[in-house]
Amino acid sequence: MKEEKLLTIIVPSFNEVQSLPLLLKELVPFCKERNWSMIVVDDGSNDGSKEILNRYKEHEKFCVIRHKLNKGYGAALKSGLLACETQYAVTIDADGQHFLEDTDKLLTCMTYNDADMVVGSRKGSVSRSSYRGMGKSLIRFLAKMLMPVPIHDLNSGMKIYRTDLAKKYIHLAPDTFAFSDIITLIFINNRHLVLEEPIRIRERKAGSSTISLQTAFQTIMEIINIVILFNPMKIFLPVSLLCFLVTFLWGIPLIISGHGVSAGTLLGLISGLIFFLLGLIAEQLSLIRRMNR
């Protein structure tokens, strides 16, 4: 477990001046003991985070990547993963909610099962906000409707990746908070072994979260986009069938009553046909993309 080039812990951070000192006080000796590397991505913070990170810049295996402007949670993770030179990469949040010892559990699960990704599952933990809990449930429900998802906690910020695979797919993931969900779905869709391992979480020690209702909406849109990219008929075929069903329920009684075929019936039939043909075209484009990757 203490081999050279084994693992890097990546921490995306934006305006976490209150949380960073507490996290780094634990993280630096933790990684030093295991001979792991650390990458903190300062995503355009303007609250004094730079000064705190500068205190640790002399530590061996400690790297800071700075974005001049705030690019987003996903963009910060991308920068960290692209800079990672170890076989595995673990991502954790800067707010101190994760227990560092759980990274050992994730690594053990990863190596023992020869997995490609292990998600730190918070299943059973009570969400700090009822709205966030509802949002997570909605995202899971939508994802499972559109593709097989064997993972409960899609948007967990604590994951371990095979670094080479993460680098291969991160260009498909967004720069927003939806990165966590989408990168997991990409691994699953490409038939890589994705497992879950229970982890503990604790309340944020300092600062405040920037996750909002807009975050959930962006995530839902990104899930739809990634399904259209990989399996578009999952979207277009149900919409097409729904158009045909509504059209027949509307049009047949009119035809039976002698009123003929209405304009609404024709519109419904044409709409269903268009959605079906769009699905076929999107499916062919998806196939071409898969063949050329």
Image (cartoon, grey):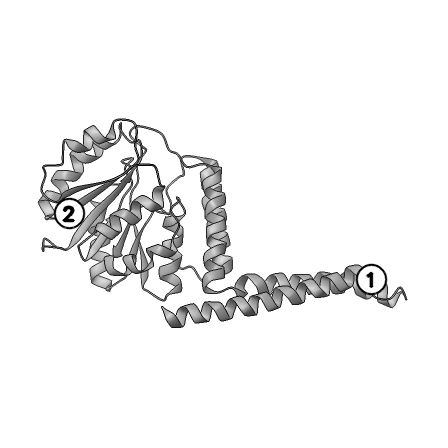
Q: What number is the disc on residue 37?
A: 2
Question: The C terminus lies in which quarter of the figure?
Answer: bottom left
Asked if residue 154 can be seen in this view, the reply is no
Residue visible at 37% across and 49% down?
A: 179
Going from N to C along the chain, the mark reached first, 2 or 1, is 2
Q: Residue 162, image x and y in percent?
A: 25, 59
Look at the numbered disc 1 and give the secondary structure of its residue.
Answer: loop
Q: Amino acid at mark 1?
A: Ser
Residue 221 against residue 268 in the figure, above or below: above
Q: Residue 201, image x and y in percent?
A: 30, 40
Residue visible at 50% across and 50% down?
A: 221
Look at the numbered disc 2 and give the secondary structure of its residue.
Answer: strand
Q: Amino acid at mark 2?
A: Ser
Residue visible at 9% across and 42% down?
A: 60
Residue visible at 50% across and 71% down?
A: 284
**Which residue corresponds to mark 1?**
262
Residue 280 against residue 18 in the figure, above or below: below
Residue 208 against residue 61 in the figure, above or below: above
Q: Residues within 10 Å of mark 2 (few under 14, many from 20)?
A: many
Question: Splitting the image into 4 quarters, where does residue 288 fall?
Answer: bottom left
